[in-house]
């Protein structure tokens, strides 16, 4: 059980971004609106705003992820922050220093913001709580913690959906694949239900769906064609390779047959349905190349919007 | 067979730098002239021009090379670009993502320029072609691909030769060593013949010389003293350690005896001949310390000119 | 035996920072005074001074240390330098290039300053001497060399002591633990005796104390309670894990019993004694959490002052 920690300060401002769970609808919308204003910065020749000049942003990646780290690095640099990348698994952690001692040390270097990726669910909460108890004015963004949450991914997904579908209140959205192990799925379910999506569906084999989905307002489907029927948005999830090595799945081929998104299965969705994926894709496992490269895929738009959304979060928290 | 891809756009500007092969003489000379103008920037206290401010340059090293990556990072920073270093072998590649999916993702983050090092010959061509087909305004610089080309190395070598010898049209130049596996040699042969050097020589054992050199306008020598006779420039090549472990060479000692550049062998060259090496040197294998540290070596000038040449290429392509 | 090399130029300015041994008292004090002026920069929203704008600072870490590298990176960035991180063990060193060839190459890229961490005692001296012999205007800061010195750590420790105790001339200071293998201890002993501390003590088991301490003006204690009696400052040293695996120590538990700093042992010191540690701490090995987190610990102040001290050294040397 992960303890919740306040993300919003006494003045109603975003202080940390730790989870979508508990984030009010108005705050999510404020992030999306702010991102919209930042989107054109990355389109300019001089992709640079002075908003965070002289601010020290630390990318603390206790779990390796070049791609996510790079997106935060780009977002912070485009706001003129000083960015420091620390791959902690290779450093103090191996010298036996505790997580909070590492945090205390970096905070003592006058950090302004930590972007934290950690294999342990709840680690960013622990860090934020610790800093707040010390009265430190240092902010924390969760860049993915264990199987728990990946809030900026859910926000960029929400941005993408709003961009293509205008509003949330009439939508049918299906999340397909390994919901059980996916922090992306968990954050997305919280975001979409908060934003008022009336029909959120989870599609996958029983071994990859967690219990309790119905109590979160999610309809469960084991048959993909049924689950995709008439949806406006399909969010495919990455199948971690290690799942296929374990006992959860028979094989990649078998998985693709039942839950891989092919044009044939996509035809069950609404004709103007969009297809999303958090990347990196396993082509031929959870998604067919004909779909990934097809006209309904908005996967690369997600990436572009992701930079703007991370700029928005950094700017709202640290400016 | 590596497919060629246009490096020059409709307005005659350098769009990508993928290979020296196919680059017109006038374009090579324009790079050298531009580098000349940038040379003094690195000599100032404030080594900084605003030319690429707010531009996003990605160092995509699919093959590790701290030195080459650093030279591009320095060049880009001195032009005020934002530089992002991605060591891809340790990242998405290991998650099974395809090369072009990685490129699509980074392009979607509004990259301006990719500096690509890859173990596969032709990878930078493939990337540039893909980006152009998508209509993306993203530029590609080949920082070494397999055994194919290393164009910025050839350009800095040409710069060095022009600096010390003033022009190319009366020169005798010998490349010595492992021509077969050397992308540096391949790029240099194209550059020197294009620039009008009348006598380009390849010197090495038969096992380390490729076929077809004569058709590229190169004279082949197996005896080093003969090959160096009266040359104005000696370009030594690095002997990869793995060559000596294989069946191609008997031993480092034996190699040094026949093809190591000693003062005695260098005496066969013109008295004012210069000695070049792309680094890092294997002292006592392909070059004797007496030569490496001697008055004819211009190896460190190559390094200094290399920063200016890379600034020139970055500036011409992305400014 | 490590050869000394001049750190101060003909005009009395700091040219390199290689060791505290040989550094005059007035120069140490000038560093502390300069750091004092830089301290508030890191407290501002815009943590940035233009002092080293356009200067190229290279972090050359031949031995991995994310924490120390990061402190120098932060200090250099807050002075607006361009910082290039080179983890050399993973690079040219593995290609067989010599240390001085690597240095020559980087100097040829118009480096202004090298921050060097190296497992070999004396490596930074060798580098500085080599650069000076070549007449290069490149500066060297020793960020820890073998068992020899770690001068910026000693300077930040001196800063911390001066901050809390105002002056050095009436103090009793104990260094506790593995003095034998500690470059921090060696640099601290030189700094504290130079600054006029009348009573410097070394406390530890005979197997972890070097010979010759008395000739450096240090009193030796094997009983920790005796060694801590009435001291004003306790500097705990990190116990490297490898010591416990070897024959030098029976076990971590045994070590903690005799030399771990507990509240009970700390009670032998002066009531207002401060407790310092260079980090990262081994809680429960050399220090008890009740002390590490207690009111007398100034361990995180050391970290904060460390940034200011490194800014001071960078600024004095390279501005």
Image (cartoon, coloured by chain):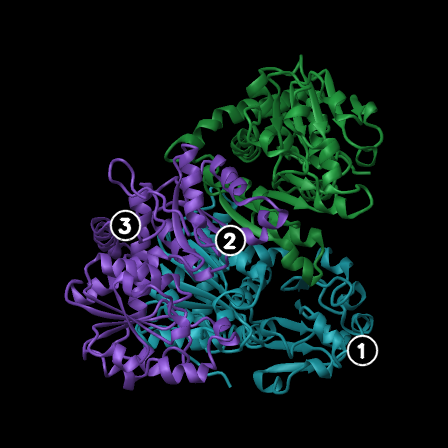
Chain colours: A cyan, B green, C purple
Helix, strand, or loop for circle 2?
loop
Q: Residues within 10 Å of mark 2 (few under 14, many from 20)?
A: many
Instruction: Quadrant for the N terminus of chain B, please.
Output: top right
Above or below A306: residue C220: below
Using the rendered view, name the quadrant where residue C55 is placed: top left
Q: Is residue C300 above or below residue B196?
A: below
Q: Give the residue pinned by disc 3.
A: C23
Q: Of helix, strand and loop, which one carries label 1?
A: loop
Residue B75: in sight, yes or no?
Answer: no
Tell me how far mark 2 sits from mark 1, CA to CA: 47 Å
Q: Residues within 10 Å of mark 3 (few under 14, many from 20)?
A: some
Give the side of residue C164 with respect to residue A159, left or right: left
| Subunit that carries the residue with mark 1 | A
Pointer 2 residue = C62
Do discs 2 and 3 share a chain? yes
**Residue to which mark 1 is pinned:** A250
């Amino acid at each position: 059980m992960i303890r919740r920690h306040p993300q919003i300060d006494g003045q109603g401002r975003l202080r940390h971004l730790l989870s979508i769970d508990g984030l009010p609808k108005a705050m999510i919308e404020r992030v999306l609106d702010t991102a919209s204003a930042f989107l054109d910065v990355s389109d300019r020749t001089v992709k640079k705003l002075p908003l965070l000049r002289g601010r020290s942003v630390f990318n603390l990646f206790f779990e390796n992820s070049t791609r996510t780290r790079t997106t935060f690095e780009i977002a912070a640099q485009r706001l003129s922050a000083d960015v420091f990348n620390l791959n902690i698994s290779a450093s103090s952690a191996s010298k036996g220093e505790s997580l909070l001692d590492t945090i205390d040390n970096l905070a003592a270097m006058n950090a302004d913001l930590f972007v934290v990726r950690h294999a342990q669910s709840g680690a960013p909460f622990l860090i934020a709580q610790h800093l707040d108890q010390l009265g430190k004015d240092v902010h924390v963004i969760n860049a993915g913690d264990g199987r728990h949450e990946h809030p900026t991914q859910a926000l960029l997904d929400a941005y993408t959906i709003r961009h293509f579908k205008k509003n949330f209140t009439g939508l049918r959205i299906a999340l397909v694949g390994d919901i059980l192990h996916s922090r992306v799925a968990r954050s997305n379910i919280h975001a979409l239900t908060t934003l008022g999506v009336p029909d959120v569906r989870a599609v996958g084999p029983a071994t990859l769906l967690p219990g309790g989905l119905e109590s979160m307002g999610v309809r469960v489907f084991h048959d993909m064609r049924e689950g995709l029927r008439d949806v406006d948005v399909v969010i495919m999830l990455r199948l971690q390779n290690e799942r296929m090595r374990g006992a959860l799945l028979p094989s990649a081929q078998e998985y693709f047959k039942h839950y891989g998104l092919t044009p044939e299965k996509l035809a069950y969705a609404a004709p103007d349905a969009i297809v999303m994926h958090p990347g990196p894709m396993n082509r031929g496992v959870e998604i067919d190349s004909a779909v990934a490269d097809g006209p309904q895929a908005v996967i690369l738009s997600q990436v572009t919007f992701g930079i703007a959304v991370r700029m928005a979060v950094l700017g709202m928290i640290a400016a």
